[in-house]
Each structure stands twice: as C-alpha cells, then as structure tokens.
Amino acid sequence: MDDILLTKYLLNETSEAESISVRAWIAAHPDHARRYEHLQRIWKTSKSFGNQLTVNEEEAWHRFVQRRDSMHTRPASIQVQRMGWLRYAAALVLLPLMLWALYDFWNTRYGDTASIVYETGESTHTDTLRDGSIITLNSFATLRYTQTARTKQRIATLEEGEVFFKVKSDPDKPFIVQSGEVTVTVLGTSFHVKRSGDETEVIVESGHVKVSGLKRQVELSLGQKLLINTATQRFEEERVSDRLHNYYVDNRFVAVNTPLWRIVEVLSEAYHTEIQIENPQIRDLRMTTTFHRGDLDRILDVIGMTLRIEVKRQGNKIVLR
C-alpha cells in the first residue's frame, strides 16, 4: 500500500473509493493492520508534539527559498502550479516524519520518555538498540524498549514471545527486562527470555543476571535456567545442556545428548507444526547433533534414520513411532 495514500487516509482526505481500498487492505492481513497502527502512533505523537510549535508556513517557505537561491543559481523556468502541488505532497508525506524525528531527538537529548515497539510476524528480527545492545526477536514476539539520556535505566518490556538479548555493559544504567510480574536485571551479558502467558523462562549464555518474581530473587550465571509461573507459583532452577532455546538467533538446532521429546518440542515451535511422539518408549532416545534450520522433512528424515524410528505425516500433523 502506498504511504501517500495511507497518510491521506489518516488525514481524512481520501475519496470514498480510496477509503474503501485502504480499509480492505488493512483487513486483509494482520501485518497490514500492524503497519497502519504503527503509522497511526507516529502520526498521533507528531500531532501532540506539533501542537506545541507555532510555525508560519509561508515565512518558513520563503526563508527556505532564499537560502536555496543564495547557495545555488538555477534557471527560472519553474512551473508555479506544479511546485505548489509538489509542496503539498511533500508536506503531506514528510511533515509527520519530520515532527517524529524532532520529537525523538528532543526526548533523547533532554530526557523525556520515548519508546520503540518491536513486533514480529512469521519471521525473526534482529536490531541494535540505541545503547548498542543487540536483540533478536523470534517470530510472533512483541517487545517495548524505553531509554532516554537522563534516566538511569534501560527498560525492555516483553509482552509476548521470546527474545535473545546481548546487552552492552553500562554500570551506570542497568538493563531491565520486564516479563509480566517477573523482572530480569543485568549490567552486561547475553541471555534469553521467553514469555508465554503467566510463565517466563530465563536462560543465561554469558555473565550474570538477577531475576525477581513471586517475592523471591535469584542470581543466574552461564548455563543456568529459571522457570517462573505466577499462576501456579512455580519457581524452578535447572541447568541447560543444549542450545535449542536460541535456534532463532543463529538458525541452528544444537542438541547435546538431548532427549527426543525436547528436540520435537523445539521443532514443533520453530516450524509451527504439530509433531507427536506416538510411542512412549522412544521419548527419551538421545541425540548429539547440529541441524541447520532448513527443510523440516529433511531434519526429521535424519532423526528417523539416526534413531531408527518411523516418521509419518497424518494430515496436518507428523507422527513419530
């Protein structure tokens, strides 16, 4: 969908036919709706900030023309009507973005709170935060990140899904991940956080993190895992022996003497496919291997040949026996 048309729709300047087209496009796919909502957030923020500014558009335009002409001499064969249309189109598209950029700069420089929301669909997403930390979101994850120059904290709120954090060290500004009622606090480390409803999983890959929840607090180090469920009051520490939890970061499934049930659990999640172990006797068969994320059928064929088990497709699910 054309950004100009979306902007016109936000300004209520579309024709009836254009409005119908935009609404149909938004309803056609969740990604379209998210894109439009993101544009709405930018527009609303820019409007609220823009209301604080008093700008004489004609004076600003004339100053721009004078400055431009003082720097460059160009032929005077300019079509006035065409320029007027171009000015309108440019203002329509660029004004919200310019105001948003100014708003973001103001917040960064002087400390007013500003947030970035990350949402993924079927694919993963890696980004570098303002402080230099790197995040990788798995598919269908939502994360809100807040940081300003004046505050003493860097705050990430995990609303759903799982994210791998590689946090840049800054002793003066702790990095805090909020997952429901669970809080993870670090200075500089790499770790994985997964939220599913009331349950939060934290796995540390380097350094140390402090986790608080259910009125308890614990420090985790390399290779340690904590599961907290605020509904069932579960608070369980254990060690991890594989790296299957961060398959979405390096696109590899790393199993180290890992039971079949665990491999199946991760593959089902990664490929959004139901995989069942029909024979209980094969659940604890173990494998040490590395699969590069690719075709699921090829991975299952290797598992079948290695463990000498049968792999069958039954409708929309896969059965191992």
Image (spheres, helix red, strand yellow):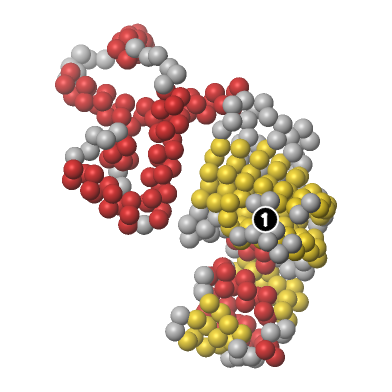
The answer to whether 282 appears left or right of 19 in the picture is right
Specify the quadrant of the image occupied by residue 108: top right
The answer to whether 226 appears left or right of 26 in the picture is right
- Label 1 is placed on what type of residue? Val
In percent of the image, x 70 and y 43: which residue is there?
A: 176
Tell me if residue 97 comes above or below residue 143 in the rendering. Answer: above
Task: Pick whichever, 113 or 309, lies toward us.
Answer: 113
Specify the quadrant of the image occupied by residue 3: top left
Tell me if residue 281 comes above or below residue 182 in the rendering. Answer: below
Split into 4 quadrants, where in the image is the C terminus? bottom right
Tell me if residue 122 comes above or below residue 81 in the rendering. Answer: below
Q: Position of residue 26 (x, y in %)?
A: 33, 51
Q: Position of residue 79 (x, y in %)?
A: 17, 20
Q: Which residue is mark 1?
A: 193
Q: Position of residue 83 (x, y in %)?
A: 22, 22
Specify the quadrant of the image occupied by residue 227: bottom right
In percent of the image, x 58 and y 58: which residue is there?
A: 161
Q: Secondary structure at mark 1?
A: strand
Q: Position of residue 11 (x, y in %)?
A: 30, 33
